[in-house]
Image (tube, rainbow, N blue to C red):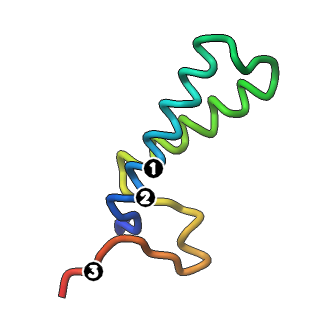
Amino acid sequence: MKKNMGVVDRVFRIVVAIVVALLFHFNIVGGVFAYVLLILSAVFLFTSITGFCPVYTPFGFNTCKLKE
């Protein structure tokens, strides 16, 4: 997998995942909506760690700086 996520994109996804986890932990969100958000935040964490977002590929997005 070729990296297609830049640093800002990765940090933003990690922050969103942490916020969602805190909202769930303090029972601010609940029910099915909370579990959907938790799954989404897990995907955000995974893509942030790997630096690759499969959704970016078909659309040709690349937020990673290319080495020249």
Looking at the image, which residue is at 35% across and 68% down? 2
> How far is the residue under mark 2 from the one under mark 3?
15 Å
> How far is the residue under mark 1 from the one under mark 2?
5 Å
Looking at the image, which residue is at 39% across and 53% down? 10
Q: Name the residue under label 2.
A: 9
Mark 2 or mark 3, which has the lower sequence index? 2
Q: Quadrant of the N terminus?
A: bottom left
Total labels: the figure holds 3
Q: Farthest residue in the bottom direction? A: 68
In this rendering, the answer to whether 16 lies above or below 25 is: below
Give x and y (percent) for residue 4: 40, 68
Q: Quadrant of the C terminus?
A: bottom left
Residue count near mark 1 (Cα–Cα under 10 Å), binned few <14, some 14–19, many ≥20: few
Q: Mark 1 points at which residue?
A: 12
Q: Farthest residue in the right direction? A: 32
Q: Name the residue under label 3.
A: 66
Looking at the image, which residue is at 73% across and 32% down? 36
> Going by the image, does 36 lie left or right of 24?
right
What amino acid does circle 3 point to?
Leu
Residue count near mark 2 (Cα–Cα under 10 Å), binned few <14, some 14–19, many ≥20: some
Give x and y (percent) for residue 64: 35, 71
